[in-house]
Image (tube, rainbow, N blue to C red):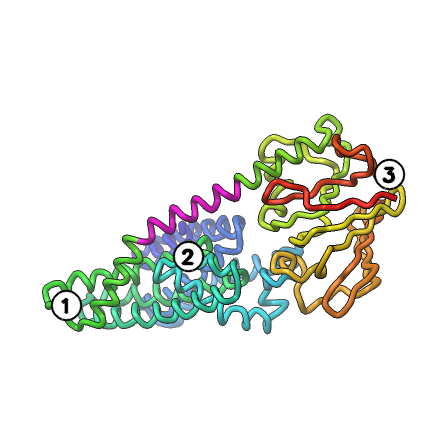
Amino acid sequence: MLGLWMHLEWRERGRAWAMPLSIAGLALGLAGGEGALGFFAYLGCYELLGHKGPLRQRLLALVPAVLLGLAYVGAYKWLGYGAFGSDFYIDPARQPGPWLANALTRVPALLSGLLLSLPSDLALTGPGFQLALGLAGLLGVVAVGLLVRAAWPSLEEQQRRHLRWLMAGAALSLLPVASTLPSNRLLLTPSLGGAVVVAVALTQLWRWRERAWRPRALAMGAAVLVLLHLVTAPYFWWETAAGFQALSARGDRIHGILAGELDLGRLAQQRVAVLAAPDPMVGMYTAARWWMGGGVLPRAWWTLSFSPEVHRATRTGPSTLELELERGRFLTTRGERLYRYAEAPVAQGTEVDMQGVRVKVLEADAEGPLILAMVTQRYRVTPMSREEPGFDIGVTLSPRGGLPVRLTLR
């Protein structure tokens, strides 16, 4: 935002000293995450749609930002950043086809959060919710577009000029965040322009109070915007906060399991194998949250499965283990597809080296892996549970606080 602000200071008010500050601000934003790419969309739309100077001058003004963006993308790829092989996170450069197919539903769902203040996070619960949110987003575009069109004649030319590039910038800034599942947490950058668009629509509603609410259809649409943005939005905000609190509480229960299962005095020299983490959102952050809470990390933290089904673990040797599900296949649920996309099924005989643990698919069919074998390299598996005198290679993480795993000792 600092980069965009300084760019406007440079171009609108002729303050040359603001140009290097703009580049510095954009670079700082990129160092924080890919979401800063959305501000480059605002810069481009401002020069093409908002500035009044000659086209050649406007294009030259974009050169510093374009060079910075190209350098960032080059370094990003060269250093190996980005996501690949996931059904949730899709890199448009590596998978343009799947990215476009998903963006066709993800962008409309994000628009439902941007224009109607609906919780686009509901898309996480299933494709049906994502489709419904997408339809709501398209209706929001129509409703807000008609309201802005009705307000357009009453706007000053200066307001129209800035509204044009802010609307276009908000729309284009949705594209970088369409690489993952819709969520209102992704709308910070698009909301810079989206908030202006909604404000224009609500202002038009206020003007219509003197016209006996005509035309009535548009007045009703604006009234719905008031309801969504001023009445229900605080509730959704509270609901989101409550959801994060529940997520935190599940994490606390898991940490209680870990504190009871692990030898904290020896943990820094040990390696932990998590047999199953049925809740991926909790399981994927457990080690990081453990460390952030002051806990000592082990030398390795291996999560073997994110399947929500009951697991059966069978020890087959001093340092070997076989893992299977009581029903179903591995890598078939939405949570598991976060780490392995459907277009790359795991065949029987596949081996994966996890830097200390080697996992082999012993049995698989067309639907997915059935039995996995885990072989530790150079480390002897030792009991960890204080309750079971027999074999226990690790712990399982359940959102309910239990241990949904059955061990078969040999």
Query: With respect to residue 105, does 250 lie above or below?
Result: above
Residue 366 location (% of width, % of height): 75, 70
Mark 1 burial class by Cα count in 10 Å: few <14, some 14-19, many 20+: some
Q: Which residues are magenta?
A: 232-248
Question: Tag 1: residue type?
Answer: Trp
Q: Is residue 245 magenta?
A: yes
| The disc label shown at residue 162, or none | none
Gap between marks 1 and 2 measured at Cα: 29 Å
- Mark 2 = which residue? 119
- Please report the residue visible at 66 percent of the width from the left and 47 percent of the height from the top: 277
Secondary element at image label 3: loop
Secondary element at image label 1: loop
Quarter of the rendering occupied by the C terminus: top right
Q: Quadrant of residue 108?
A: bottom left
- Mark 3 = which residue? 380
Q: Quadrant of residue 250?
A: top right
Residue 283 location (% of width, % of height): 63, 46
Tell which circle, 1 or 2, labels the residue nearer the N-terminal end: 2
Gap between marks 2 and 3 measured at Cα: 48 Å
Tell which circle, 2 or 3, labels the residue nearer the N-terminal end: 2
Tell which circle, 1 or 3, labels the residue nearer the N-terminal end: 1
Query: With respect to residue 321, does 150 lie above or below?
Result: below
Q: Are marks 1 and 3 in contact (CB under 8 Å)?
A: no
Question: Tag 3: residue type?
Answer: Arg
Q: Residue furthest top?
A: 265
- Kindly report the secondary structure that dominates the magenta region of the rendered protein: helix
In this orientation, does residue 33 appear?
Answer: yes
Query: With respect to residue 176, does 301 lie above or below?
Result: above
Residue 245 location (% of width, % of height): 48, 41
- Mark 1 = which residue? 213
